[in-house]
Amino acid sequence: MRRMAGMAALALLVAVAACGPSAGTPGDPVVLLTNDQPGVGCPANVVTGALVVDVKAGTAIVDNGIRKPIRWPPGYSGRHSGGEVEILDASGTVVGRTGTVVRLGGGEIEGVWLACSGPPTRE
């Protein structure tokens, strides 16, 4: 019984750490989930929510309490900036930052938000 309680506490700690800001030196790259098919059309939809760090996808958006990993357009990249992640477009311009509430064009497929090119609009 005592061992199970210890394992449950460890599992909770790992789960909380996975949802928190990723540690990293400012400027270090962050691997973002990106679309590898340039020229694919952009769904005509919009999501508004908090842009957050995601351990697997690099970033996610929280829409009405639902966390959706973001798949950015080809050429987008990320980098650490304190406890946040900055999103850069293909030209290297910062177009977004976790820790902000944004309106992001795109569409959802299988729980992943497919972001359109262009910067998210800050709310």
Image (cartoon, grey):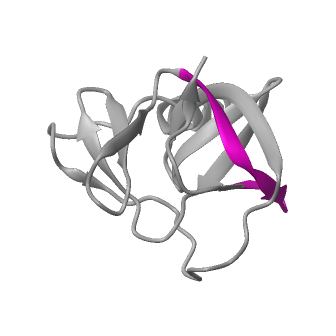
* Residue 123 spot, x, y in % from top left: 61, 16
**Quadrant of the rendering where the N terminus is positioned:** top right
Q: Is residue 87 visible?
A: yes
Residue 60 falls left or right of residue 21? right
Taking the spot 82% from the left edge, 53% from the top edge, the residue there is 44
* Residue 96 spot, x, y in % from top left: 43, 36
* Residue 86 spot, x, y in % from top left: 34, 39
Q: State whether residue 6 is above or below residue 43.
A: above
Residue 122 falls left or right of residue 1? left
Q: Is residue 4 visible?
A: no
Q: Quadrant of residue 24?
A: top left
Residue 88 falls left or right of residue 58? left
Q: State whether residue 46 is above or below residue 70.
A: above
Taking the spot 53% from the left edge, 56% from the top edge, the residue there is 56
What stretch of residues is rendered in magenta?
A: 101-113
Which of the two residues, 98 or 121, is positioned nearer the viewer here?
121
Residue 8 falls left or right of residue 36? right
* Residue 18 spot, x, y in % from top left: 51, 39
Which of the two residues, 102 or 50, is positioned nearer the viewer here?
102
